[in-house]
Image (cartoon, helix red, strand yellow):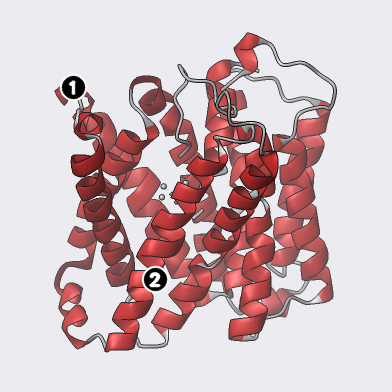
């Protein structure tokens, strides 16, 4: 596996979620800096696992906050515009104070970041939050988690990576699981919400596109810079899409503003910071696998907070998706990575 493609796959595990993402996501590494535990801090891997798990759980709350906010009649476009814009402002202020050098971007790369922000942020956030409005939080996040399968396909098409038997089996499992979660086995069930399913798949594809586009950005810039300008341009387009609908924010009740703030500070920013901290103690591949707990966290939170449940075949589908994505991301045990395979 090439160094670039490996970095792209590991980059997906962070949901943008600020999973970048945020997720719900970009690693705090570049291809020039191996994404392994920092020297001198690997003596406490338990802390790294705990931080990564905390990030996954917080990312898992994204759909829950969105559902709670929708209860106040808020337009999804308005919500994602606020999310991206506030995240951009918060990150911009932080970098100005902590590390202004991260703000530098070459003028010739502006067109790239415009496309990056539009595809990876604008289209992804619009499709995912619209899917959340039309379907359950659990179904939306499981469908979104087929994104690594699309990344593997994209890597094979665009980067010439070989599709092994294991990867092909993983892809079949992931897509079959998605079919079951979406209710494809029951015509009446899937006919109830075709738009939500289609939007969920678009979210997965655009999320995969975000990961593949990161190949270029992370070759020149840190993930902080990449996330900053992706959110900046993506947020700009979202505000344009929202247009006059933004007047809706004048009527937000205090509770709705509190939920929006939690959405921005929690699954959009805090989870990303926790993930970055986890990379000081554990390998990025291990952290990525731990972050697969995100759909499980969403499922549990959706059950407790929203009363959502999955039927028997949908549960089997969710298990298939997670098993397939695990096969795509995990390395074979005992096999030593070459220098070419490090992110």
Q: Report the mark closest to the observer, 1 or 2.
A: 2
Residue 129 location, quadrant: bottom left
- In the rendered image, which quarter contains the C terminus? top right
Q: Is residue 212 left or right of residue 143?
A: left
Q: Is residue 108 left or right of residue 3?
A: left
**Which residue is at 53% across, 62% downward?**
58
Of 155 and 190, nearer the camera is 155
For disc 2, the neighbor class at 10 Å (few under 14, some 14 to 19, many from 20) is some
Q: Is residue 322 left or right of residue 110?
A: right
* Residue 209 seen by the camera: yes
Residue 262 is marked as 2
Q: Position of residue 75 (x, y in %)?
A: 32, 77
Of 316 and 102, nearer the camera is 102
Q: Position of residue 218 (x, y in %)?
A: 40, 26
Q: Which residue is mark 1?
A: 108
**Which residue is at 71% across, 16% downward?**
337
């Amino acid at each position: 596996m090439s160094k670039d493609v490996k970095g792209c796959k590991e980059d997906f595990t962070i949901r943008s979620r600020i999973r970048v993402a945020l997720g719900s996501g970009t690693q705090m590494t570049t291809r020039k800096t191996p994404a392994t535990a920092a020297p001198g801090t690997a003596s406490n891997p338990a802390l790294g696992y705990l931080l990564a798990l905390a990030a996954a759980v917080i990312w898992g709350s994204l759909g829950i906050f969105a559902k709670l906010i929708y209860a106040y009649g808020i337009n999804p476009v308005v919500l994602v515009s606020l999310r991206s814009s506030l995240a951009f402002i918060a990150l911009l202020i932080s970098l100005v104070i902590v590390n202004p050098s991260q703000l530098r971007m070459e003028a010739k790369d502006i067109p790239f970041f415009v496309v990056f922000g539009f595809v990876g942020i604008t289209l992804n956030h619009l499709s995912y939050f619209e899917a959340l409005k039309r379907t359950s939080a659990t179904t939306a996040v499981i469908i979104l988690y087929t994104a690594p399968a699309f990344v593997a396909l994209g890597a094979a098409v665009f980067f010439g990576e070989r599709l092994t038997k294991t990867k092909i089996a993983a892809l079949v499992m992931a897509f079959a699981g998605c079919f079951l979660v979406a209710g494809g086995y029951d015509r009446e069930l899937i006919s109830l919400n075709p738009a939500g399913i289609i939007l969920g798949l678009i979210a997965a594809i655009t999320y995969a596109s975000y990961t593949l586009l990161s190949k270029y950005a992370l070759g020149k810039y840190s993930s902080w810079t990449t996330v900053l300008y992706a959110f900046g341009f993506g947020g700009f387009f979202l505000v344009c899409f929202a247009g006059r609908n933004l007047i809706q924010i004048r009527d937000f009740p205090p509770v709705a503003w509190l939920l929006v703030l939690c959405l921005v500070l929690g699954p959009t920013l805090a989870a990303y910071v926790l993930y970055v901290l986890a990379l000081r103690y554990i390998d990025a591949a291990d952290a990525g696998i731990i972050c697969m707990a995100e759909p499980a966290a969403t499922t549990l939170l959706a059950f407790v907070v929203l009363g959502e449940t999955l039927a028997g075949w949908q549960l089997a589908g969710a298990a298939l998706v997670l098993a397939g994505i695990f096969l795509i991301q995990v390395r074979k045990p005992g096999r030593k990575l070459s220098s070419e395979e490090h992110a």
